Image (cartoon, rainbow, N blue to C red):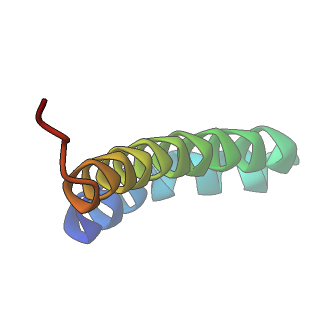
Amino acid sequence: MKMGYILMVLIVFAWPLNYLYQRQLGAISFLLLAIFFLVISIKEMKKHKQAKENDSKKARPEKFK
């Protein structure tokens, strides 16, 4: 995921999360941020796994009979 996209999402949601924090509902904003970063990390792990599988397929040449 691009860093600009992550920053844009965080900037857009900064005001509502700050509002929740000021109303003593900081746990909700923390939960939302945790879910956001969990989704980002899952996407990055999938990309990394696919890249690793592609590299392993390229490293082993197929045997022809």
Foreground residue among 39 and 21: 39
Q: State the residue in front, 17 or 60.
A: 60
The quadrant in which residue 65 appears is: top left
* Residue 57 locus on image (x, y percent): 27, 48
Q: Nearer the viewer, residue 5 or 42?
A: 42
Q: Position of residue 36 (x, y in %)?
A: 54, 43
Q: Nearer the viewer, residue 14 or 56?
A: 56
Q: How many marks?
A: 0
Residue 52 picture location, percent across and down:
38, 55
Q: Residue furthest front?
A: 65
Q: Is residue 3 above or below residue 51?
A: below
Q: Is residue 9 left or right of residue 21?
A: left
Left or right placement of residue 64 versus residue 60 in this view: left
Residue for point 34% across, 60% down: 6
Residue sticking out furthest to the left: 64
Residue drawn where x is 57% and y is 51% of the image: 37
Compared to residue 7, the image places residue 26 above or below, namely above
Quarter holding the N terminus is bottom left
Q: Quadrant of residue 35?
A: top right
Q: Residue at x 26, y 62 (%)?
A: 59
Say whether residue 63 is left or right of residue 47: left
Residue in the picture at 47% in, 48% down: 40
Q: Is residue 22 left or right of residue 58?
A: right
